[in-house]
Image: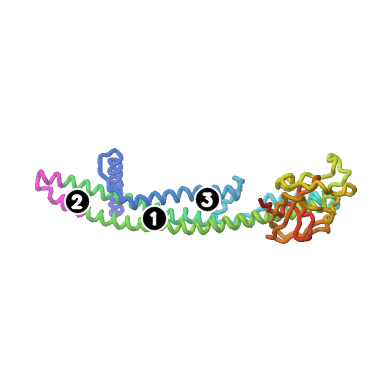
Amino acid sequence: MDFNVKKLASDAGIFFTRAVQFTEEKFGQAERTELDAHFENLLTRADSTKNWTEKILRQTEVLLQPNPSARVEEFLYEKLDRKIPSRGTNGELLGQYMTEAANDFGPSSPYGQTLIKVGETQKRLGIAERDFIHSSSINFLTPLRNFLEGDWRTISKERRILQNRRLDLDACKARLKKAKAAEAKASLWSDEVDKAEHELRVAQTEFDRQAEVTRLLLEGISSTHVNHLRCLHEFAEAQATYYAQCYQYMVDLQKQLGSSKGDVFPSTFVGNADGMSPPLSTSPPAATLPLLQAVSPNPADGTLNPSEVKPPSSGTRKAKVLYDYEAADSSELALKADELITVYSLPGMDPDWLIGERGNKKGKVPVTYLELLS
């Protein structure tokens, strides 16, 4: 019992001494031991790493899960060490609603058929999004969170200890200075000087040891940057894969809707006089390509006979094929990824299509499968 009381009294005394030293330093009434420039740079770099890691972590969480209520729920499950319940993405839910609506309206009707096609694509987009979120959470968010909750806490703890050791050291320096000043007046204070010098040597040793421990931890920030760099590459690759999947799914959907446009939008469709839907592609309008005035689609049936098409004498453009494309009929030209073809447009032609030539073969090609070259 007496030991505990003495320890509490000693701790209170140390705390009071440190508080006095800290306060006097703030008011410029006491000297303080300064760390070397290299150490100060390490501290600044560590603080910057911590601050930016927190911001990147929080904003990535918002990117992956925009719903704040869902983020709070996931946070609580994580803190309670319980499995987060599986939930579908918005795309999957939208796809489900579209499929159910198609079954209600009639899956064989034009609207029902299109709802099913679009709904299936939404489901695939949702699944791709869920895989991207899962991959990013494991390979990117978890390492950032582990740093903040692990390494950074250790660094912060050792920095607090170093701060206390520095305050103790400076307090010992102040006591020794006072003892020497008193010794100059009376030799009776010589014992106090010896005691103060001994305490200073002990405080200096503890400070130096703690400074070395803290310095090693701070230098480990470089390894943290290397680890986070690798995680960042994985995050970027996962994001690129996700967007590539989404693009391909939408290209496939556009092809499906384009091939069935005549069935989905019959000529008697009310509200659209020409029976055509707005183009799904956001590619530049065909007017940017040279127009062929001599030959146009057959006005009688609206079809194109590639054998009757002649390229313009000048101004044709080259295009690089992005993806393989299988021709749906004899009026289209099959494509192979990475090949170069010549393209041009016809007046009145669907802006989603161009005329493509490769050798002695020609036919319609979808714009979304091409990269137009200068």
- Which residue sits furthest top? 27
Which residue type does callout 2 highlight? Ala
Tell me if residue 365 comes above or below residue 272 in the rendering: below
Which quarter of the figure has residue 340?
A: bottom right
> Pointer 3 and pointer 2: residues touching (CB < 8 Å)?
no
Give the residue type at disc 3: Leu
Q: Mark 1 points at which residue?
A: 218
Q: Nearer the viewer, mark 1 or mark 2?
A: 1
Q: Is mark 1 on a helix, strand or loop?
A: helix
- Which quadrant does the N terminus fall into? bottom left
Q: Earlier in the sequence, mark 1 or mark 3?
A: 3
Label 3 neighbourhood size at 10 Å, few (<14), some (14-19), many (20+)? some
Identify which residue is drawn at 53% across, 58% down: 231
Which is the main secondary structure of the residues drawn in magenta? helix
Compute the Cα span from label 1 to label 2. 32 Å
The answer to whether any part of residue 109 appears in the image is no
Element class at badge 2? helix
Please give the range of residues in magenta: 180-199
The picture places residue 306, in percent across and down from the top left corner, at 82, 55
| Label ID, residue 196 | 2
Q: Which labelled disc corresponds to residue 57?
A: 3
The answer for how far apart the CA atoms under marks 1 and 3 are is 21 Å
